[in-house]
Amino acid sequence: MISLRKIEIAKEIKALQARIRKLGPVMRGSVTIMGKKNKQPYFSVSMGGKTKVVYLGDKRAAKAKMYTENYKVMMAIIDEMTLLQMELLKLEGKE
């Protein structure tokens, strides 16, 4: 028998999945400013033990910041979904 709490959790997970779908582009990494005299925005990310850097310029810096913010929101949602899935597993263990 499906408990009321399991139904509530399933609804919460679906709502979180919908929020992820609405986020748009995501990028893990950060927008940094480099240079001593001529400061310029760059995007950097560490992958496979190596840091990759891309020059952004002023026009693309705002877009890259939005993508990194979307990534942070997505990870927060995933953390919340993980807790809900853990609760589901606990409930299934009690059945």
Image (tube, rainbow, N blue to C red):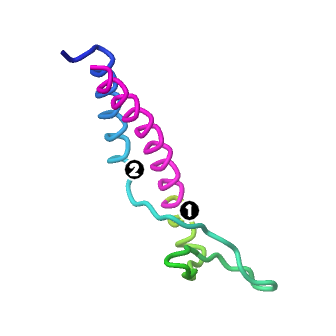
Q: Secondary structure at mark 1?
A: helix
Q: Amino acid at mark 2?
A: Leu
Give whichever of discs 2 and 1 has the lower sequence position. Answer: 2
Residue beneath disc 2: 23
Residue positioned most to the left: 1
16 in magenta? no
Q: Main secondary structure of the magenta part?
A: helix
**Dot 1 amino acid type:** Lys
Is 8 placed left or right of 81 in the picture?
Answer: left
The residue labelled by disc 1 is 65
- Magenta segment, which residues? 67-95
Image position, residue 68 (x, y; %): 52, 60
| 64 vs 84, nearest the viewer | 84
Relative to residue 38, is residue 6 drawn left or right?
A: left
- Residue 26 spot, x, y in % from top left: 43, 60
Q: Is residue 30 shown above or below 19?
A: below
